[in-house]
Every structure is written in structure tokens, then in C-alpha cells.
Amino acid sequence: MLHIALSLSKISAITGKSINDKALMKESYKKTDYKWEIVWKNVIIFTYIHLATIYGIYMACLYAKYWSILWFVALGIAAIIGTTAGSHRLWSHRSYKAKWPMRLILMIFQTIAFQDDIYQWARDHRVHHKFTDTDADPYNARRGFFFSHIGWLLIRKHPDIVIKGATIDCSDLMQDPLVVFQKKWYKYLMPLCAFIIPTLVPWWAWNESLWYSWHFAICRYCINLNITWSVNSVAHIWGTRPYDKSVSSTENIGVSLLAFGEGWHNYHHAFPWDYKTAELGNYKFNLTKTFIDFFAYIGLAYDLKTVSADVVKKRVLRCSEPTDNPTITREGDMASIVFVTYGLGGVGTTAGPHRLWTHQAYKAKWQLRVILGICYASAGMNNIYEWVRDHRVHHKYTDTDADPHNSNRGFFFSHVGWLMVKKNPDVIRRGRQVDMSDVLADPVAAFNIKYFPILKFMFAFLLPVMLPVYAWNETWYRAFVSQNIIRYVILLNAIWSVNSAAHIWGSKPYDAHINPTENQWVNLFSGGEGLHNYHHVFPWDYKAAELHGSPTTTFINFFAKIGWAYDLKEPSKELVKTVMRKRGDGSHSLWEAVPYPAINVSDTIWPSSLLTSHNSHIEIVTSKRGMTC
Ligand SMILES: [Zn+2]
Ligand SMILES: [Zn+2]
Ligand SMILES: [Zn+2]
Ligand SMILES: [Zn+2]
């Protein structure tokens, strides 16, 4: 080690570049004698498990019986509890004591999880804590994400793990008869609890197919494994380190959510004997703590160990990054949640009021309509009724006085100005003429419209701010600014830019005679609504673009796969080609031998309702059916 460090310091002195810790560690693995030895048996098993899981998820979405889903979710929860409350907090760390009935339950749950028997699990975990981030750490996170996640199971253990692991005292574990019993009979108990019973119950009790049931069982196991592994990988790489910056473990909300409170892992490495594995009670995603508290309440758990606020504070002050400067420690979490809320609001708008309710470009079952309604509310715009009405008027009277955001009045007007001045009387008159009966006939949309002020307040402004505050103690100020100002402003501008930028700048491959354009920037920020020349020519295409590929289209395709979206409308390739050749500006990549400017529109054989968007929505849909059938 030492000579490697020295030679590296020489290199850095010559090149003048500083070499960080990571590079140093990686280099050291190249230079030591230690060689990997791949355990092919495990590689094959884990590959099978993951492939079967993909198949299982797919089948579960399509064919699983509701009871099967409930059954496997329940098993998954039991397995996580067995690992977190059982082999982790009880047996590895002795952070509380439990009477035999609770230990029996935990032992069974831990067997369902199939992550080796309690004895072996606890021994490995004690080694992990004692030698964190060294070669003796079984899932040393310094060797990268893949190694700490699953790679450590695919190669032979580093010799240090065996040598130093032998110094760990595990005699206390052998004094627990339940641990001894499980260790002795593990090779029978495990297959029974983890696979055989879970597969047979759905088949026997509610006639699930054995083939599916088996794959759901594998799927349950695989998801559980990945959740547990993420504590060793994700929560050792990404997140903040307010309690101890010298160790790789972090505070990670995502892992906490999935692993029932085990993601507050920087705290856990600083105070491993705390049964909460987190500092604060108001960390919401700590179901394991709730579980232990409940058993303490009924008297089966006792001697719950925890750490006083004073000790924690001293520790934080002594050896942490400055937590009183929230911009340093919380940036990552806040940025990722802003990204998520931005995406949900964007997809909610484009797949919801736009493609579904305005254009009826596809049909959606009530479950999807509820999801879309909530996501749309989180974007914080007008209610669905106003949105659809304005947009239908926009398509019917594009770029005339009756268009609410007439782009002939300039960028500013079509972007945001139209919301700041009184509407043109034409807009109001035409708006009243729009047929909105289909939207009002949808109970989900009607509910959304009726209670929109409450829904909008909750999903656009209240929850996005409350979540980070309650989930990981974000300050109200920072949560408010990043969600309700930064995210909201960017999202609104992205959607407005469809009306402004995508009506002004860009090419017109499908119809050179209208304002709307193909604009890649708008397309990027609006989740796939920027190919707007196409959209005005074929407004009933659920893709809002000629080709697949935008996030919104992917979103709809996904729900079409599981059956929640159906009747996805698209024009035929031939139709697109013909229209593009007749009216396009020549910028389409398939443009063939038709000179620009396109030939006179009037002598086309196509009904004009197909070629322009200046037609009511209903007409377009009916004439389209005539053409493609
Ligand atoms: Zn750890
Ligand atoms: Zn631990
Ligand atoms: Zn438009
Ligand atoms: Zn549209």
C-alpha cells in the first residue's frame, strides 16, 4: 500500500495533478497481488434471478391475480423487516432485546429473506462495521457501486475478510437457541420459507398458475435483495455525511424509503447501537422503528438503546461536514426531488389534458386518468376544463385573433403575455362554442375540475415542499424556493414555450403554410411536445410526433403495455409521407424528389380536414378513421 501511495504521489508531483482518494484506491487494486476469482455458479444464478424477475414483473403487470400481488408484497415486507429489525438491529448490533415470540417471528421473516442464516449475516455485518471501507469489508464501497451492490457475491472473498473476520466475536449469537436452530436446519428452512411455500400458497388458495407464482416468488426475492444491497452500495456512495465525513456511508432518503429506515446510514455507522438507526423520530421512512416500537408497546421488545441528542450534537460538531450550512449537505437530495416533480408535472400535462382530454389521441382506464389528474394538478396550471377549451380553440383557430396565444402577436404574447391581458373577444366567443361534453362526461376529469383549487394547492405547492422537510429535515425555506419557485417557473416556461418558441423558430417538414414548427429545444424541456409542426397536422396522433422516443410517449406506451391505455391513434406512414410531400418545406429527412415550394395545395386529392388543423377535433378524428381503415 505504502509504496503505491508513494509512487502515486510521485506521479501527481510530475503531472501537477492531484489524485483523489478514489483514483488512489482504484490504482491500489491494480497493483496489489490480489486477483479476482469469479464464482461462475453465482454469476449464473444471479443472472437467472434477474432475468426471471423482469419476466415476473411483466407477467405480474399483465396477468397476476390481485391476491397474488398482495401476498408477495406482504412477503416482501416481512423479508425486509426480518433483515432490518432481525438480523441487523437485533442480532448484529444488539440495539434492543426481544422475547422469544418476537425472535421467532423475526427468525421466520429472516429466513424468507434468504440472505444467509442469521449467524453468517450478523458476522459479515459486524466485519463490515469494524473494517468499513477497507479490504476486510465484505462490501467495500471504495471498490465502486457494482462491487458493493452485487459484485462482492460474484467473486471470491478478499483474503483480508477471512483473516480479519476471524477476530470478530460472535459467541453471543450461539447462545440464542433460535439462531442455533436456524443455522442447523437452514438448508431445509430456507427453500421452504423463501420459495416453496410462497409459490404453493397462491396456487392452492386462489388458483394462480404455478408458472407465474414461481416467477413472482423469484421476483419478490430479487427486489428484496436489491433493496438490501442498496444499503451497502447506494447508501455508501450518494448522499450527505453530517455525522462522520471520514466514513463512506451516507444519509440517503431513497434507500430509507425502500429499506424501511436503513438509509440513514451515516448516522448508523456513527452510532450503530441505536435501535432507530437514525437520529430523528420524524424521519418518516423508518417502518422498522415503528415495528420495534409496536413490539415494545406490547412488551415483547425491551431495553431499546438510543443516543442522547446531546451526544449526537457533540459528534456532529466534532467531526462532520458543516451541517449548519444546508446548501452543502442537501443539494443532491433537493435537486433530485425537483427533477422528479418537474417530470411528473410535465408528463401529467402532456399525457393528460393535452393528448388524452383535448385530442382524445388514446383512451385511458380510470386508474391512469386518476394518475394523470394528480400529476397534472402538480403542474399548477389552469383546471382541465379551461386548459382543454383553450387548447381546442388554439388548434381550430391557430394564429388568428381567436387563438388564445396567437403567435403572430410576437414571442412575449404567445409565451406568457396572453395570461396577463384581457382575452380578445374572439377568443371568448369561440371558446364558448367549443364542445366540451366529452370532458365533462369523464367523472375523473369532472372531479378534478370541481375540486381543482384544493388539488392544485395540495399537489403543486404543499406536498412538494412538505416531503423534503419531513423526509430528511430540509429547511422550509430551501424546499419552498426550489419547489415552488425554481421548479414551478421552469415547468411553466417549458410548457409555454410550446406555444411561443415552437410557433416561431424551427423547421416545417409537414406543413410549410402554418406557424407551428419542429423545435428540438422545446421538445427536450417539454417531454416531447416540441415537434409541433407535426402535431398541428396530425393532432390526434398520441405520440405528438412522427416517431417514438419522447418521455411522454414512453409513459403512454408503458401504460398501454399493462392495459391501462388503449386505442392509441396514429396515422399511416403513407398518409404522413403524402402530406409531408404535398405541404412540407422540404426539411423532412425522407423528402424525395418533390421540389420546394410544394405544389399548390388546392389540387390535392386529400380532404382538407386532414391537411390542416383548422377543423374541429371531432371532424379530424372521424375523417382520420375513414383514411386509415
Ligand atoms: Zn454500512
Ligand atoms: Zn449495521
Ligand atoms: Zn400549437
Ligand atoms: Zn395540441
Image (tube, rainbow, N blue to C red):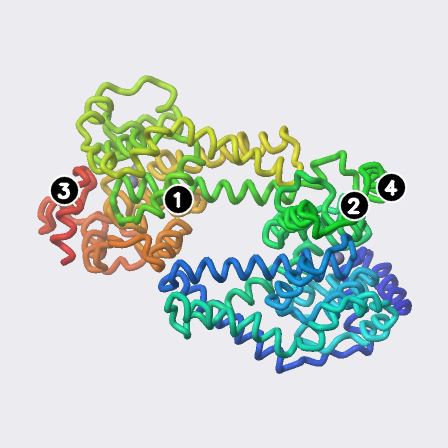
Indicate which disc, 3 or 4, sits on the residue closer to the N terminus: 4
Residue drawn at x 10%, y 47% is: 607
Which residue does the numbered mark 4 point to in the structure image?
A: 318
Which disc number belongs to residue 619? 3
Is residue 472 left or right of 134 when viewed as pictured? left
Query: Dot 3, how many residues are within 10 Å of its Cα: few (below 14), some (14-19), or many (20+)?
Result: few
Q: Amino acid at mark 4?
A: Arg
Q: Of residues 471 and 353, which is closer to you in this image?
A: 471
Q: Quick check: can you spot residue 501?
A: yes
Query: Distance from label 2 to label 3 (Cα)?
Result: 69 Å
Q: Of residues 304 and 49, which is closer to you in this image?
A: 304
Q: Is mark 3 within 8 Å of ligand 4?
A: no
Query: Distance from label 3 to label 4 (Cα)?
Result: 72 Å
Q: Is residue 452 above or below residue 536?
A: above
Which residue does the numbered mark 1 point to in the structure image?
A: 371
Q: Is residue 561 above or below residue 218?
A: above
Query: Distance from label 2 to label 1 (Cα)?
Result: 41 Å
Which residue does the numbered mark 2 point to in the structure image?
A: 306
Query: Distance from label 1 to label 4 (Cα)?
Result: 47 Å
Q: Nearer the viewer, mark 3 or mark 4?
A: 4
- Image spot of residue 325 (x, y percent): 74, 35
Looking at the rendering, which quadrant does residue 400 occupy?
A: top left
Q: Secondary structure at mark 4?
A: helix
